[in-house]
Image (tube, rainbow, N blue to C red):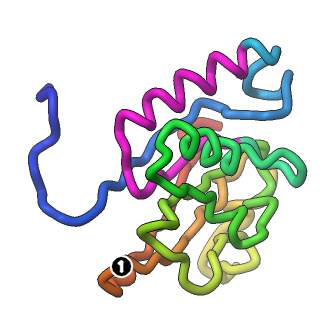
């Protein structure tokens, strides 16, 4: 495996990463204690800071109306990388839940370089034609997690739409 990815050109870096059940609510799927959460956060922010991307697609973030884990990651990244201004797309849009699973996806972006355009979109069963799909697909026990789509505008007025997915591989 090469030490560095090949140069591909472009103006910004996009990274997708599994944050391994990053939960602010202790004792759920993530850390059991504050010390474990602090350790998990430190390792995660160190890794993401070294990547220094404009966009981070996150998988396995706590899905909660009260604990905004994705924005907590953005805030910690902002502290580690003061030149950045990360925001979680769901926090900016005022969306608390993405689907009905305990974990969700989210998108962090550097709001100093990119702006969110329009509404974010969450694909759920209500969006599917039951004549074409064996429901449930996204909502309910043993279903896939709802994908999240976000359109961002670059400084040179280019629109880029990201779709973050995390399909179940078992069960």
Residue 124, relative to residue 157: is it above or below?
above
- Point out residue 49 in the picture as x, y percentages from the top left corner: 43, 36
- In terms of secondary structure, where does tag 1 sit? loop
Image quadrant where residue 90 sits: bottom right
Q: What's the residue at 54%, 39% (across, down)?
A: 169
Majority SS type along the magenta span? helix
- Point out residue 168 in the picture as x, y percentages from the top left corner: 58, 44
Range drawn in magenta: 36-61
- Point out residue 96 in the picture as x, y percentages from the top left corner: 81, 61
Residue topped by disc 1:
155
Q: Quadrant of the N terminus?
A: top left
Q: What's the residue at 55%, 71% (across, down)?
A: 149
Residue 149, relative to residue 159: is it above or below?
above
User: From the viewer's perspective, is 37 left or right of 44?
Assistant: right
Q: What's the residue at 40%, 57% (across, down)?
A: 54
On whether residue 57 falls in the magenta region, the answer is yes
């Amino acid at each position: 495996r090469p030490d560095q990815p090949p140069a591909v050109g472009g103006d910004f870096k996009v990274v997708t990463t599994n944050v391994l059940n990053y939960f602010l609510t202790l004792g759920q799927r993530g850390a059991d204690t504050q010390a474990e959460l602090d350790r998990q956060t430190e390792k995660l922010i160190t890794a993401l800071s070294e990547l220094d991307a404009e966009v981070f697609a996150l998988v396995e973030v706590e899905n909660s109306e009260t604990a905004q884990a994705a924005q907590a990651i953005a805030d910690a990244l902002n502290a580690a990388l003061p030149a950045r201004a990360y925001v979680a797309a769901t926090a900016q849009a005022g969306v608390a839940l993405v689907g009905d699973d305990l974990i969700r996806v989210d998108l962090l972006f550097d709001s100093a370089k990119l702006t969110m355009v329009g509404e974010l979109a969450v694909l759920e069963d209500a969006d599917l034609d039951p004549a074409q799909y064996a429901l449930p697909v996204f909502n309910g026990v043993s279903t896939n997690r709802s994908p999240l789509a976000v359109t961002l505008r670059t400084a040179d007025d280019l629109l880029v739409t990201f779709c973050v997915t995390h399909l179940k591989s078992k069960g």
